[in-house]
Image (cartoon, rainbow, N blue to C red):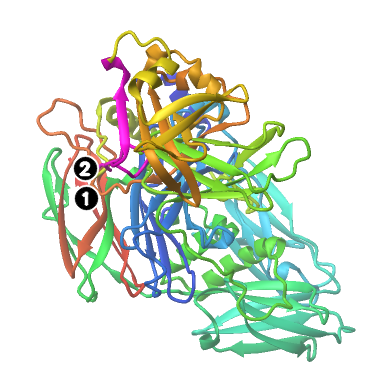
Amino acid sequence: MKKITIYRYILLVWFNFFGQYIIANNYSKSQIGDTDINTLFTDREIYFVNDNIFFSFYLNSSKQTEYDENTIVYIELINLNQNIAVIQKMYQTDKGLINGKLEIPEKISTGLYLVKAYTNSTVKETEQFHSKYITIYNISDSHNLLVGKDNDVEFFPEGDALLLSKINKIIIKIPSKYKTESKFFVQKNESTVEHQLSENNIIHFEDFFEPLTEYKLVIKNAYDSVVIPFPSASEKGLITKIRYENQDIKYSVETNDKDNFKKYKLFILDENKTIIDNSELILNNFTFQQLFKNKIFNNGFNYFVLTDSDNNIIKINATYIKKNSSEKINIDINNSHIKSGDSVSVNLSANNIAEETELSIAVVQKNALRNFHNFEKSFYFQDKDILSDFFEKNSEMLSNEMENILIMYDKFIAETFKINLLKTGSNKSDFKLVHSGISLKGNLIDKSNGEGVKNTKVYLSVLSHNPQMHVTETDSAGEFSFNVNDVYDLVDIYLTCDASETIDYQINVRSPFKPTEQNNNRIEKYILKLDEANLKELYTNSQVENYFSNYTEEGKPFEHKKNPFNINDHIETEYVKDYVGIKNILELFVELIPSCKIRKENDKFIFQVYNNGNLLAGKPLVLVDNVPIFDNEKIINADISKLRKIEVINQVYILGKEQFNGVIMFSTSTNNFWGIEFSGNEIFVKYQAITSNYDTDYCGYKTKTKIPDYRTTLFWSPKLTLNKTGTFKFKTSERAGTYIIKAEGYTSAGKYISGTKEFIIE
C-alpha cells in the first residue's frame, strides 16, 4: 500500500484547488421524444484511482417496441482536462436498465471527469448525452495539478449589452478567491453602495444608466481593495429581456436608437431546436413586449431567437420549463446515531407512487458528496445538462433567481448556438437502435491509391472468450460490416482478407464510440476546498479497501462456446499427441486424416476435403488457431511437435453469405499462431464488446475477518424494487463520521422520485 508523505498533504492543502468542480445532484437527464426519460446515477462524486464507480442508467420510453432487452448503451469515462476517453464500454439493457462498475485506472491524472451514457440513436445528437460529472484524485499526481480558472470577475449584462438612457440589469460573477471576508460595493461616480453576495456567488445590479456616469465594482477586505470598471454602455443598441409572470413568460425588446424602425423576426425553439412558434415584430416607441402563455412551451429549455429580416441571429434568450413533477421517498432507520460494525435496516416508502419502481440506492460517506449550495452556481450557466439538473432539483427557486442564472447562460449560448432558422418542424435524425451483439465496421483500402478495395472477402476471427469465425464481402466503396454475438468485455479480434497478392492493402476498423470532441463549453476548474482532514480520510478509505479487498463478483458469469463453428456432426478430430513417429504434416495427413488430402498444383500445395470418398470441389477454409491462412506452404513447413490437434468439417459449410468446401482447423500449443509469418497487412484488434451487467448489490463488507473496514461506499444497489414500500440492510464501517442514504429513480410514467437520510457512525 502506498504511503502518503506529510509533504504531499501540505502541498495538496497549499494548492487548495486540488479538487475540481463537483456536481452534487446524482443524476442527469434529457429527453428523446416527448415522454422518454433517461437517467444516469452514480454512487458518489469523489473518487480516487483504483476505486470503482458504481452506476446505473435507466432507458425508459413510451415506445416499448424501441427499447427492449437488446438495446446497446455506450458508457464512457472522459478526462475533461485532456478531452480523451479513459474507459469505453458497451452494455445490453435489461428491461430498460443497465448497471455496472467502472474500475478507475491507476495511471490517470487528477481532474474533472465525465461519465457519459448514450445509445446509437443519440450518437449524432451531442445534446442528448446523459452525463454525470465526477472528480478523481491521484495523490501521486500533485505536480500536475492545474490552477483553476476561477480568477476573474465576470460581468453578464442582460441581453448581452448595456444601453445608455435605459434601465439595465447586470449579473456580476464573483470568483472564490474573493468570497472570504470580503465586502462588495458598486461605485457610481462619487457615491458608493454596498451589495450582498447571494448564495449563488453573484451580485445582481440594476440601474438607469445615464450618460457621463462611471460604474465600478469595489472589492474590499482587511488587507487591500480591488477596483474593476463595469463594461461601457452604448449610445445605440438593442437588448432583450425575459421575465417570469406566474407560469407565463414575458419577452421584451428595447432600444435606445431613435432611428431603429427595422422589422424583426422572433422564433421560439424547444431544447431539441424544433421551432414551436414564430412571428414578426416591430418596435413601438423603442419597445416591444409580449406575454407568452405557458402552454406553448415544451418541457426543458426553450429559446427566444431574435433575427433580422434575413434570418441573421441578433439575440438569444433562454427560459426553462420544468420537465417532471417529483415525489419524495421517505427513508426511515431505527436510530440516527449508530455504532460501527452494526447492521442497519432501512425502510423506504412513497405513498403517492402507485406503480412498482426500481431505485438506485447508495449509502456513502457525506464528504464524498457535495451539495449544490456549497459551490459556485455560476458554473452552471456553461452546461445545459448541469443547469437542467439544478432547475429540476430546486423546485422552490424564486423566479428572479432563475432569471439571473439564465442571463449568464444566455451569454454562453450566444457564442455556441447553431441552427438553421429556415428549417421548420422537427429536425430530429431518423435512427434505428442497435440490438443484440456488437457491430464491427471498417473498410479495406488499397495503399497505393487510397481507394477502397471492392468485392473482396474479409475474414474476422474472435480469438478470446467465445471463439468465432465470420466472413463478409466489401461493397463497391470497400466498406465492410460484421455482426458479432455472444462476446463480452474486451476481446481479441483478428481481421484479414484474401485480396490479390499484388495489392498492398490496409484494413481499418472504426470505433463504435462517438469521437471525444473538444470541450467548447468553457468548463472551468472551480476550487473545491477539500481540507487536509477530509482528503486524508477519503484517501485512507480508498487505499485500505483497494489493498485488502478482493471483491470481484460481477453477477452471473456468461457461458461461452469453445468451437468457432456451430456444428457437431461431420467433424473429424485427431489429437496429434496420441501418435508417435509422425515426422511432418504431409505424413500426418496420409496416416491420420482420410477425409483430407494434400496435393501439389502449379508448384503450390492445396488441401482437398472428401465426404464419403467424394471430393468437395473448390478450396476449403484453412485455420490455424482460428486465424485464416491462405498460404498452405507455411502450414506444410510448420513444426509438427507444436501441433495439438486437427479438426476437419468434411461437408460444405455456409458462413454468412459465403460457402466453403469444408473447413480444416489446426490447433497448436503456441501463442504465436505456430510461428507463421503474416504478410503485415492483417490486423489484431482489442475490441470492446458487451460488458455484463453488475447485477449484484455491493456492500464490500467481509464477515469473520480482521481486515480493517474503511469503506466510503457502504452499500450500492442499482435496482431496488419499491412497491410503495421497500427495505434493505447494510453494515456500518469502522470509520466514524456522517453518512448519507440516498435513493433515486424514475417511475414508468417519468416521475422523478428521491429521498435522503443522514446518520452518524460513532
Residue situated furthest front in the rendering? 613
Quadrant hosting residue 56: bottom left
Q: Is residue 677 left or right of residue 668?
A: right
Residue located beneath label 1 in the image: 759
Which residue: 74% across, 78% down?
422
Which residue: 81% across, 79% down?
308
Q: Which residue occupies the foreground of this view, 376 or 658?
A: 658
Segment colored magenta:
557-578
Q: Quadrant of the N terminus?
A: top left
Res. 181 in view: no
The dot on residue 699 is 2
The residues tagged by marks 1 and 2 sit, at their Cα atoms, a distance apart of: 17 Å
Q: Quadrant of the C terminus?
A: top left
Q: Earlier in the sequence, mark 1 or mark 2?
A: 2
Q: Position of residue 29 (x, y in %)?
A: 45, 63
Asked if the residues shown at circle 1 and circle 2 are in contact, with their CB atoms under 8 angstroms apart, the answer is: no
Q: Is residue 40 magenta?
A: no
Q: Is residue 364 left or right of residue 87?
A: left
Q: Which residue occupies the foreground of this view, 594 or 351?
A: 594
